Image: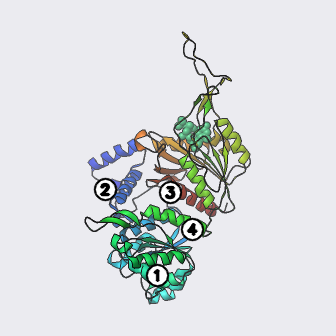
């Protein structure tokens, strides 16, 4: 697979690919990557996980190890989803290690788990290499969080009983880290009194749970409570626990976020606005606060609650927003997620404009609003170390984003396609391409919370790499 290049495809396929890439404003390589990622997401096939198509984008430097998660894979049919979980954790800048139980090896191989983790997966308690090299005590100690996925009924029983007869249970007994269990089993096994007793004991002992969820089981025709939580759900729960466990990669940093639409008055009762919900900007503010940053959120009028942990300044118009942003300076990182109205009414009336019979509709003379992002990015003094903008586009997404990056003088642009058919405007999901001077990095379609977590992880890496 590593030798596959666009050049080797047949002419017809190349033409189709070229058309598709042009339509989406991507390079052909980026288009191949997007197609593969969608296919891997859909099929959940392990083989695609390790495929790296050729790219002009320089490989990112290894992330500094700020947060470490040990994934323990138990022996259940849901084990294949744990490979996706590892990928999702790594996307968030989390360093992952992996232990497989003997039963897990019936479902996934240590080789495939190791390939996704990027180092060997551990399996044996009495393994010369692992005992002398890493060993169960080090595995237990060198994790900020342990995620057991799938946590089978048998594995839960062993942990609740304090067993330590294999590597997974020995690590779990030896660790002082928080443990997050993602149970997965047949609904009858989950409902069984013994399992419920074990789950209650584990909860009382301080273990955290994500799922199980209700739904179809692997066994034909079975449904009920027992499905393992989805990888993104588990990754989000892991993020939450890592934050509460004190892994705060943005501790000591000041972060400014703008969010929501602006309202530009026409008169005291009417205004010009747009469809922005503020969900993405608010999610970023919440994720940055969870990561330990001192966050100021400057929000336009939205119908969602203030995110926990951030200082929120509520504003109406673009000019109010700029004033609030200037007041929040200096900051280390400024993220401009607001959908600022480009124009305002030149002379907004002090009184309500009245209809007068027989008179023509009033003409609204518009003037351009200040560009808040460009103003901050071009500051001569106290420019934030990292200035990040969004580019909401309906066509030629990457080309427009690259143009905005240069024109506005910011460091990164998170570009997204907001055509009505994507449902991004006001919706809960987002598909981002991170555009930097060094290249374009497409992110998989994910929830706005996950976009926020991925962005925060990237920011932490960047500040660490620059030692800024
Ligand atoms: N932005 C801003 N102030 C403005 C307009 C935009 O801070 N007056 C920021 C947005 O928050 C976003 C980025 O600039 O981070 C790009 O916004 P967008 O609306 O996509 O770009 P525009 O400059 O408005 O360009 P156009 O409308 O031509 O696409």
The N terminus appears in which quarter of the rendering? Answer: bottom left
Q: Do callouts 4 and 3 mark residues in contact (Cβ within 8 Å)?
A: no
The residue lying at 42 percent from left, 39 percent from top is 420
Q: Earlier in the sequence, mark 4 or mark 3?
A: 4
Q: Is residue 428 visible?
A: yes
Specify the label residue 450 is tagged with.
3
Mark 4 = which residue? 242
The percent position of residue 220, horizontal first and vertical second, equals 25, 66
Specify the label residue 50 is tagged with.
none
Mark 1 = which residue? 159
> Which of label 1 and label 2 is nearer to you?
1
Pick the residue in front: 45 or 13: 45
Question: Mark 4, residues whose alpha carbon is within 10 Å: few (<14), some, or many (≥20)?
Answer: many
Q: Is residue 73 visible?
A: no
Specify the label residue 8 is tagged with.
2
CA separation in Å, label 4 and label 3: 15 Å
The residue lying at 49 percent from left, 43 percent from top is 426
């Amino acid at each position: 697979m590593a030798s596959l290049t666009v050049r080797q495809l047949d002419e017809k396929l190349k033409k189709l690919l070229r058309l598709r890439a042009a339509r989406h404003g991507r390079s052909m390589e980026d288009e191949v990557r997007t197609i593969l990622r969608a296919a891997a997401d859909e099929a959940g096939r392990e083989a695609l996980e390790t495929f790296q198509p050729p790219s002009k984008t320089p490989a990112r430097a290894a992330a500094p190890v700020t947060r470490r998660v040990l994934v323990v894979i138990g022996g259940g049919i849901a084990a294949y989803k744990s490979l996706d979980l590892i990928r999702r954790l790594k996307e968030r800048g989390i360093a992952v290690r992996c232990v497989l139980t003997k039963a897990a090896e019936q479902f996934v191989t240590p080789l495939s788990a190791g390939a996704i983790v990027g180092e060997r997966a551990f399996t044996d308690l009495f393994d010369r290499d692992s005992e002398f090299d890493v060993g169960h005590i080090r595995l237990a100690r060198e994790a900020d969080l342990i995620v057991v996925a799938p946590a089978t009924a048998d594995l839960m029983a062993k942990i609740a009983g304090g067993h330590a007869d294999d590597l997974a249970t020995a690590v779990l007994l030896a660790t002082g880290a928080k443990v997050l269990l993602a149970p997965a089993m047949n609904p009858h096994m989950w409902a069984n009194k013994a399992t419920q007793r074990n789950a209650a004991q584990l909860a009382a002992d301080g273990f955290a749970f994500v799922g199980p969820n209700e739904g179809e089981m692997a066994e034909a025709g079975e449904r009920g409570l027992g499905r393992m939580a989805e990888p993104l759900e588990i990754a989000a729960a892991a993020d939450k626990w890592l934050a509460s466990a004190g892994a705060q990669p943005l501790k000591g940093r000041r972060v400014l976020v703008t969010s929501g639409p602006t309202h530009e008055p026409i008169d005291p009762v009417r205004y010009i606005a747009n469809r922005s919900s503020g969900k993405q900007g608010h999610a970023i503010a919440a994720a940055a606060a969870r990561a330990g940053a001192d966050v100021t959120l400057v929000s336009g009028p939205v119908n969602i609650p203030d995110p926990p942990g951030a200082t929120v300044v509520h504003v109406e118009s673009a000019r109010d927003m700029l004033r609030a942003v200037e007041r929040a300076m200096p900051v280390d990182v400024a993220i401009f997620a607001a959908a600022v109205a480009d124009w305002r009414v030149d002379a907004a009336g002090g009184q309500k404009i009245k209809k007068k019979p027989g008179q023509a509709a009033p003409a609204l003379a518009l003037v351009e609003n200040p560009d808040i992002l460009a103003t901050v990015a071009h500051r001569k003094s106290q420019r934030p170390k990292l200035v990040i903008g969004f580019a909401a586009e309906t066509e030629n997404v990457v080309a427009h984003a690259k143009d905005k990056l240069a024109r506005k003088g910011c460091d990164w642009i998170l570009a997204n396609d907001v055509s009505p058919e994507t449902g991004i405007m006001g919706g809960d999901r987002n598909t981002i391409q991170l555009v930097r001077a060094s290249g374009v990095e497409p992110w998989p379609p994910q929830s706005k919370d996950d976009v926020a977590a991925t962005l925060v992880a990237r920011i932490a890496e960047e500040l660490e790499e620059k030692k800024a």
